[in-house]
Amino acid sequence: MIVSASYRTDIPAFYAPWFMNRLAAGSCRVRNPYGGVDYRVSLAPGTVDGFVFWTRNMAPLQPDLDIARQRAPFVVQFTVTGYPRALEAAVVAPERAVDQIRSLRRDWGGRAIVWRYDPVLLTSLTRASWHLANFAALAASLVGAVDEVVVSFAQVYRKTRRNLDVAATTSGFTWHDPPVDEKRDLLARLAAIAGDHAMRLTICTQPELALPGVAAARCIDAERLSDVAGTALAAHTKGNRPGCLCAESRDIGVYDSCPHGCVYCYAVTSRARAASFKGAHDPESDAL
């Protein structure tokens, strides 16, 4: 089984000691996000085919990656967007993130890291022209470190809309969810920039934006994990929502627990709630 750690929260940035404790213990308990019965995920030797780490800051977990690698191969889905602080209150600076990615590349090889420019959010602070310049600068800084960049446009759920509206009022910006043709135009231009920097651009779970030369992303990617492992992994596609091409996995995170403060985040109701969770967190617990 592939273990996802985690698209619900940033385990490497905020919960690395807990993860290493659970790795040593050989399992963790996962709180059912839909209110059902908790379930247990084995992390014991021989039961994990691979780890996928989702993060904006790998530094807290990076010193222990050799221990994780002894258990199973891993891929890091590393988000770097470089947005203004009004949109991302507490993420590491993009320069630090790029340095971490380059360090991961030196230690673990280029197939072990995927850059995520995700989500693409259109605001009066981040217009299409801003994205093109910002994306190009980040791509230039990551040449040779990654071979794929995953993008998606912000999914505006009810809580996302509420958080964006509050932030917009507080910080004095406006935002909008552009029509499909506007998204496709920007996507095509981002893909061209990625290609100029020896990267393949893929799009995460938005098939309505499909374009020639822009493939659907496989964020839980058994083929990439197989390349890292040096041997083929047995896995089948089992996406989390329509259009998702991810391999089957078990996620060990929990919602409302990431205090990065990204106002567009689908996984956090409020930063205050996430900060409260982080403050009460017990790294010795069997569940995050």
Image (cartoon, rainbow, N blue to C red):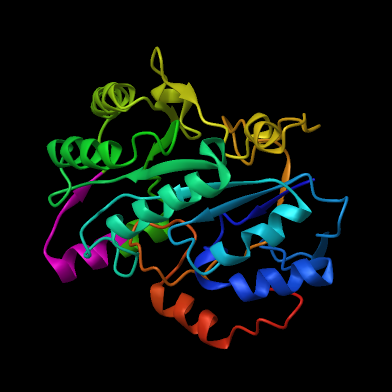
Left-right relation of 174 to 217: left
Left-right relation of 147 to 126: right
- Is residue 251 visible to us here? no
Percent position of residue 121, x then y: 28, 46
Percent position of residue 123, x then y: 18, 49
Percent position of residue 102, x then y: 41, 48
Q: Is residue 35 above or below residue 278?
A: above
Left-right relation of 239 to 213: right
Percent position of residue 148, x then y: 45, 32
- Image point (31%, 49%), residue name: 81
Chain part drawn in magenta:
164-176
* Residue located farthest toward the bottom when viewing the structure as drawn: 280
Q: Is residue 46 above or below residue 199?
A: below
- Image point (77%, 76%), residue name: 286
- Image point (52%, 63%), residue name: 10
* Residue located farthest toward the right when viewing the structure as drawn: 46
Quadrant of the rendering where the C terminus is positioned: bottom right
Quadrant of the rendering where the N terminus is positioned: top right
Q: Quadrant of residue 146?
A: top left
Left-right relation of 106 to 98: right
- Is residue 286 visible to us here? yes
**Residue 165 highlighted magenta (yes or no):** yes
**Residue 181 highlighted magenta (yes or no):** no
Main secondary structure of the magenta stretch? helix
37 vs 133, nearest the viewer:
133
Q: Quadrant of residue 12?
A: bottom right
